[in-house]
Image (tube, helix red, strand yellow):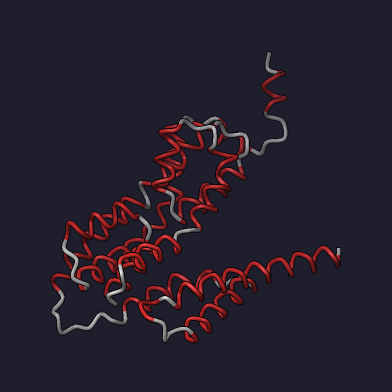
Amino acid sequence: MNAPVDSLHSGLTPEQLRALQRSPRQCARHGFMQALPFVLVLLPFGMLFGVVASDAGLDLPQILGFTLLVLAGASQFTAVQLMTDHAPALVVIVSAVAVNLRMAMYSASLVPWLGTAPARDRAWLAYVLVDQNYALAIQHFEKHPRLRVEQRVAYFFGTIFATCVPWLIATLLGVWIGNAIPESWALDFAMPVTFIALIAPMLRSIPHMAAALVAVVAALAFAFLPSGLGLFIAAPLAMLTGAAVETLMERSKEARA
């Protein structure tokens, strides 16, 4: 009687076997615990967004609405910076969307793992998809490819409570802190420092560094354009450079092989 089960689970490591035996609730708890360390990063960044947005003149309902609707730190910081620079609304919206285009690639790579989930679950997953959730989920799914779709969905939702919820709470704390800071305290440094902190950890490969270099050079070269329009030129140039360098490196590896 145990033969089919043993055959089904053959080749699995003890860790993979334990993952298969978890209930959806246990999967959610596991996802929460694995995502919990991100709180150490999300809390200060969320608070900083609340401070910067408050300093930019947004009130509490606007900041909370902004956070709930966008739910993406880099896009939120980009939009606030452009709003502070009095950029046209269209430029603000397009820039925020452009910064978040990576989410489309994240979604595409998750389709083999979550594509058969109910439509309601997929809609919620799309809404709460952020870098931290994606990184954990794709790594977990690839490590445990035999998980049922309900286990994968539960794991992903578990990560939400350790990432998205603290981000909202941190934003609220940031608004309170921002309102308490005297106007004489300049916060202009906060925005560039934030972006440096967001980007620096990603510069771990030659394509990433090449893209960053081209982005910096192009942004400076087109800085004379109004309303930050130079970014619309610098961004695609940087992405094309990164893709081209990565393609050349892959072809070089294949040639050596």
Q: Quadrant of the N terminus?
A: top right
Residue at (31, 73) in percent of width and height? 87
- 6 vs 161, left or right, is right
**Foreground of the two, 245 or 98:** 98
Q: Position of residue 140 (x, y in %)?
A: 56, 45
Tell me if I can see residue 179 in this picture.
yes
Query: Can residue 40 be seen here?
Result: no
Quadrant for residue 249, please give it: bottom right
Q: Position of residue 13 (x, y in %)?
A: 66, 39
Q: What count of labels does the image hold?
A: 0
- Please tell me in which quadrant of the rendered image residue 16 appears: top right
Quadrant position of the C terminus in the picture = bottom right
Question: Camera-side residue: 95 or 122?
Answer: 95
Residue drawn at point x = 32 percent, y = 62 percent:
43
Q: Is residue 82 left or right of residue 32?
A: left
Question: For this view, does 167 lie left or right of residue 211?
Answer: left
Q: Write the residue at 42% across / 56% down.
A: 37
Observer-nearest of 6 and 202: 202
